[in-house]
Image (tube, rainbow, N blue to C red):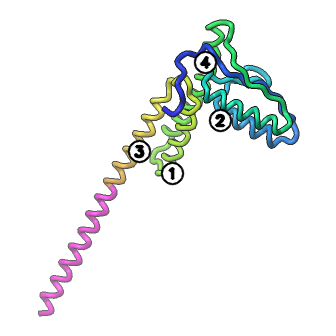
Amino acid sequence: MLATVVTQHKDWVLLSYRIPREPSTPRIAVWRQLKELGVVQVGDGLVTLPKTVRNRERLQWVAARILEAEGEAIVWDAAPSSKGESKALALRQEQARTSEYGELLDAIQASSDPGIRTIQKWRRDWRKIDRRDYFDAPLREEVRAAIEERVEARMTNEAASNAADNNINNNTADNKSASSAAGAKTST
């Protein structure tokens, strides 16, 4: 798995920020970056991720981008006051990934004969979700298996198609040889 699986989720790293509305480009870039990280929105201008060194570094990079846009940002570590609150944050993060995996699974199941580019896109999408799946969302393995089933089906179909093409080519070559041989006999 590409993401760091967080087994204990009692501590979190938070980013508190405020970014000017105009120009909108930096604000949109920050929003996209936070979405890519899979943050949990705790409140207006307050997001969190499970506490890891990597997540802290990622949020510090976002904070630097906000400061460059003349906004305000601070990254800090925190622990919710109860296990229940921490579990609620983890559940929100897991539900978001489950929803993303579900959308991808729907797309896979809706496609009857995907091309190689479609399969490659599904794999890229799965990896993107997996990178921000800190709690092994329930559909993770089901989606991975569905993609691999489509790969195997595609390979089987291609092998059958190649075999059929080879038979056609062999039959055509045999027919040409037979015609050539017959023509050679009649001319002698």
Q: CA distance from mark 4 to mark 3?
A: 33 Å
How would you classify the magenta stretch by its main secondary structure? helix
5 sits to left or right of 153: right
SS class, disc 3: helix
* Residue 182 screen position, x and y as percent: 15, 83
The residue shown at (34%, 56%) is 161
Decide which of tag 3 and tag 1 comes sooner along the chain.
1
Please say if the residues under marks 4 and 2 sit with CB atoms less than 8 Å apart.
Answer: no
Q: Amino acid at mark 1?
A: Arg
Decide which of tag 4 and tag 3 comes sooner along the chain.
4
The image quadrant of residue 166 is: bottom left
State the residue lying farthest toward the bottom. 188
Q: Amino acid at mark 4?
A: Ala
Please say if the residues under marks 3 and 1 sit with CB atoms less than 8 Å apart.
Answer: no
Which residue has dot 3 on it?
Answer: 151
The residue shown at (45%, 48%) is 113
Specify whether residue 174 is painted magenta: yes
Please say if the residues under marks 4 and 1 sit with CB atoms less than 8 Å apart.
Answer: no
Decide which of tag 1 and tag 2 comes sooner along the chain.
2
Which mark is drawn over residue 28? none
Which residue has dot 1 on it?
Answer: 117
Q: CA distance from mark 4 to mark 1?
A: 34 Å
Q: CA distance from mark 3 to mark 2?
A: 26 Å
Q: Amino acid at mark 3?
A: Val
Which residue has dot 2 on it?
Answer: 36
Which residue has dot 4 on it?
Answer: 90
The residue shown at (41%, 44%) is 151
Q: Which residues are magenta?
A: 161-188
* Residue 152 screen position, x and y as percent: 37, 44
24 sits to left or right of 42: right
The residue shown at (75%, 32%) is 63
